[in-house]
Amino acid sequence: MAEHLPPKERTKIPRQTMPEQDPLKRAHNFEEVNRGLEILVAEKEAQRCLACNDPKCVHGCPVGVKIREFVDLVVEGEYLKAAAKIREDNVLPAVTGRVCPQENQCEGSCILGKRFSPLAIGHLERFVADYEQATGQVGLPDPAPPTGKKVAVVGSGPAGLSCAGDLVLRGHEVMVFEALHEIGGVLLYGIPEFRLPKEIVHNEVENMRKMGVEFQTNVVVGKTVTVDELFNEEGYDALFIATGAGLPKFMNLPGEHFGGVYSANEFLTRVNLMKAYDPEHYDSPIYDCRDRNVAVIGGGNTAMDSVRSALRLGAKNAYIIYRRSEEEMPARREEVHHAKDEGVQFMNLHNPVEFLGNDDGYLTHARLIKMELGPEDESGRRRPIPIEGSEFDLPLDVAIIAIGTGANPLVQSTTPDMKTNKWGYIVADEETLRTSKRGVFAGGDIVSGSATVILAMGAGRKAARSIHEYLTTGDW
């Protein structure tokens, strides 16, 4: 067991590096890029924690993980206890340890970062979650006695799973309804294997089954069954809607109808959920990227996931076309860094104005225009302005539009007494996540618009608290 070092000694330890698969090799496979920390490296990193009396990192975590306590346990070599400590607040530690933007949240609040590199909280979280899974000794919290209340959770993405886990621990009976054929929502269809292996998601879902959460797949709430039917015929006492923002957005440009122009949603769903990345075992139809020119339009994490997937599917040239500069990109720095190392070509300060195709209806070029940055807009980023007369044609076979998504409309379309805003998102109280319909709560991307996994999980936890209060008191 390691000993805690004096504070001055801790600051002398450099932040430990996450081992990565070689860029030249990983650009041609879907194996996980980050390899995880070894035990001694994890302990050394944990030693860097200053053990603050008021840990700012906890305030930066949307689900409130007791970070200082779990890191102390890593220092002491108590990895299983550390994982169990995380699970008190986070039902998906192996997931969030991989895909959370820690640099903007817990690590962004770490006081070490004021003068040194912040503590690698995400890497340590992943380490203990993977250690726990490898030993088979998963420290699941014990649920409260049954309350006799039934809750339906609509959607099995991070918001739905987080809410379901917390409600089961409070003693409620929980059924999660998923429209697709596998549980996990965006964790399965949206995030590639090389960033979040599907086995990790399956393991965490199985842990939730052991906690008592029940799941039904291939149920499209709003079509297969309505919200009112869940209340009146199925006997549920409360509902949490966490259907996400899965409606693709296009640019409404001439030529978007050509074959080879995809939404990122469709492309990633075919690659990830339908396993087009494994053609030897799965016959998923996808427009062939091999030896083709592929461009992804956008600068977020979804754009990075798409372009790095296209590269692995054999693209001859894989481009990111983004209308602002790299500095304004919303994608995680790590994802941009990985994409560059793998050979993705960045065409910043460019934007398509038209897609061109052949007589057979297939994409052949994108007409791009160069951009320059003007004053800041409402997002706080400098507004991109087209440079007149700078258009040129880029040869392209596949274009993937990754400029964001809209509200999934299925539940709202058959629940007219539930208020939505002008964009189709469900209106829910910011503190309680109650909707305009009694007994119905909503959270995650279907309320906030596209956000991160951990923010959706934070909404799920908040909803679980509100639902428990409603079921306990009956007050609305």
Image (spheres, helix red, strand yellow):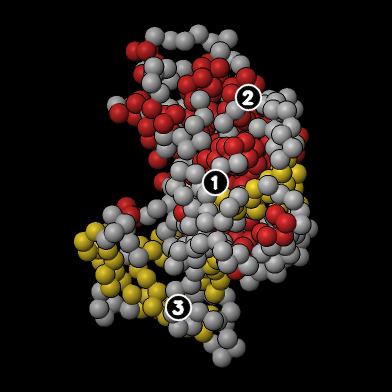
**Looking at the image, which residue is at 58% across and 67% down?**
416
Q: Quadrant of the N terminus?
A: top right
Q: Which amino acid does label 2 sit on?
A: Ala
Q: Which amino acid does label 1 sit on?
A: Trp
Q: Which of 332 and 163 is in front in this view?
A: 163
* Residue pointed to by mark 3: 252
Which of the two discs, 3 and 1, sits closer to the camera?
Answer: 1
Decide if residue 121 is in sight here: yes
Total number of numbered discs in the rendering: 3
Q: Is mark 3 on a helix, strand or loop?
A: loop
**Looking at the image, which residue is at 27% across and 61% down?**
377
Q: Do the residues labelled 3 and 1 touch (CB within 8 Å)?
A: no
Q: Which amino acid does label 3 sit on?
A: Asn
From the top left corner, tell me how far across and down residue 96 is, in percent.
55, 39
Q: Which of 163 and 11 is in front in this view?
A: 163
Is 260 placed left or right of 116 in the picture?
Answer: right
* Residue pointed to by mark 2: 84
From the top left corner, tell me how far across and down residue 37 is, in percent.
56, 29
**Looking at the image, which residue is at 49% across and 44% down?**
432
Q: Nearer the viewer, residue 87 or 403?
A: 87
The tag earlier along the polypeptide, 2 or 1, is 2
